[in-house]
């Protein structure tokens, strides 16, 4: 087994399809696709690719997440703060305790590394 893992959607297979909980949806009909390429044996770290169609939903982060958008436009509305528009090429970290709304303006795809705290 190689210790190098590439994120190759061509060979990985079909994604997991999910939607936000109905009570969290603020607008639209967002649909998510997730290709989780790596999970540590203890279940505390995940890495992969996530994609969402347009819509908005409430989020409440208990985990730490690093992301780079590879396509699309999203706006993160942190409760009590000014909204932040993120677009293709932007990288960011969402820290535990972040609450607000994730709004996908244009279908968004991100590479993520997520650590449970």
Image (spheres, grey):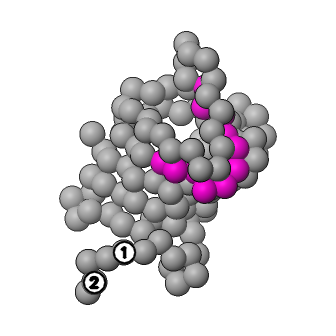
Which of the two residues, 85 or 29, is positioned nearer the viewer here?
A: 85
Residue that numbered label 1 is attached to: 5
Residue that numbered label 2 is attached to: 2
Q: Is residue 59 left or right of residue 37?
A: right
Q: Residue at x 36, y 66 (%)?
A: 38
Q: Residue at x 42, y 69 (%)?
A: 37
Highlighted magenta segment, given as a residue range: 67-77
Callout 1 crowding tier (Cα within 10 Å): few <14, some 14–19, many ≥20: few
Which of the two residues, 83 or 59, is positioned nearer the viewer here?
A: 83
Q: Is residue 38 left or right of residue 60?
A: left
Which of the two residues, 35 or 68, is positioned nearer the viewer here?
A: 68
The correct choice, above or below, for 42 with respect to 9 in the image is: above
- Disc 2 is placed on an element classified as loop
- Does the CB distance between marks 1 and 2 fall below 8 Å? yes
Tell me the quarter of the picture where residue 16 sits.
bottom right
Q: Position of residue 9 (x, y in %)?
A: 56, 75
- Disc 1 is placed on an element classified as loop
Across the whole image, how many numbered discs are drawn on residues?
2
Q: CA distance from mark 1 to mark 2?
A: 7 Å
Q: Position of residue 92 (x, y in %)?
A: 48, 40
Q: Which mark is residue 50?
A: none
Q: Residue at x 52, y 84 (%)?
A: 11
* Residue 101 visible to an observer of this rendering: no
Q: Is residue 51 magenta?
A: no
Callout 2 crowding tier (Cα within 10 Å): few <14, some 14–19, many ≥20: few
Q: Residue at x 71, y 31 (%)?
A: 26
């Amino acid at each position: 087994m190689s210790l190098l893992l590439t994120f190759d959607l061509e060979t990985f297979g079909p994604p997991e399809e999910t939607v936000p909980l109905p009570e969290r949806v603020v607008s639209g009909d967002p649909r998510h696709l997730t290709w989780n390429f790596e999970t540590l044996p203890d279940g505390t770290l995940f890495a992969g690719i996530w994609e969402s169609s347009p819509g908005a939903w409430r989020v409440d982060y208990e985990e730490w997440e690093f992301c780079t958008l590879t396509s699309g436009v999203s706006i993160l509305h942190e409760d009590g703060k000014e909204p932040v528009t993120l677009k293709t090429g932007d990288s960011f970290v969402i820290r535990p305790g972040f609450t607000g709304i994730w709004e996908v303006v244009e279908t968004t795809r991100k590479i993520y590394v997520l650590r449970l705290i």
